Image (cartoon, grey):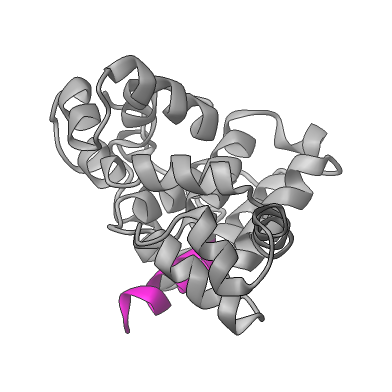
Amino acid sequence: MTDACLNCERLKVLRKAVDELLVGRDGAANAVLACVATLLREHDLAVPSIFACAGAMTLARTNARLERTSAAVLVLSRLIRSATAPVPNRKLREALRDLEMSRTEQRQLSNRLLVSKRQVGRLVKRHTSLTLRQWRWALRIRPSLPVLLGTREHVAQVAYGCGYARPSQFDRDFRYIFGLSPRQLRRLLGDSSGIADRALQGAALDTPVPASESGDAG
């Protein structure tokens, strides 16, 4: 199974875990966090997948049953769908692939798609549920995720490695996407790897996750 196919399957497991969370199934919050931790450890994770993980994590950390009819759940569903299904417009799909590889800017996207810069933003929003600014911020912090969750490297060094001049800027962008600081995300998800892959192999999502694997370790 290719990395892209594996990530798609993990997103489907995440969607199932979120559904279980919304009906109040015991252990579902831990399963959601485990899926998120496994996905965020992947290198070059697709931008919609990053935001889908952020949305699922927020639901797991709050009283999701009170939010089941909220716009947050609708946006999360759209993000997971956009992360698992290709953008139907071929030119836009190729342009977004270049954007993910940091090979293009909005002006170049505009020229490539033969539309105005404003229309580029509208197209991206319509097909991915994300703004171009969200894409840029996510692309900038994306290299930090496997490092934060897979090593003990100091957060300031992680920030510098992503091209930030000041760790405070890194912290600001990180909080915008995840609602948590890099240190808080590391504490929450640091010990959750592998649980989502066991779910892919048939582990029941309603089985409570042991405390040592629930992401509470620092």
Q: Position of residue 39 (x, y in %)?
A: 39, 55
Task: Say whether residue 160 is left or right of residue 206.
Answer: left
Q: Residue at x 38, y 29 (%)?
A: 185
Q: Position of residue 52 (x, y in %)?
A: 57, 51
Give percent across and percent down for residue 69. Answer: 86, 43
> Magenta includes 214?
no
- Name the dominant secondary structure of the magenta segment: helix
Residue 2 drawn above or below residue 127: below
Please give left or right for residue 91 compared with residue 72 in the image: left
> Which is more toward the observer, 115 or 158?
115
**In-front residue for pair 11/50:** 50
Q: Is residue 86 left or right of residue 39?
A: right
- Residue at 70% across, 63% down: 123
The magenta region covers 1-13
Q: Is residue 9 magenta?
A: yes
Instruction: Locate residue 52 relative to residue 153 in the image: left or right.
Output: right
Indicate the position of residue 91 as horizontal and vertical percent values. 57, 80
Please name the residue shown 15% across and 38% down the image.
151
One can see residue 186 in this view? yes
Quarter of the image holding residue 209? top left
**Which quadrant would residue 150 be assigned to in this image?**
top left
Q: Residue at x 45, y 48 (%)?
A: 36
* Residue situated in front as seen by the camera: 19 or 164: 164
Quarter holding the C terminus is top left
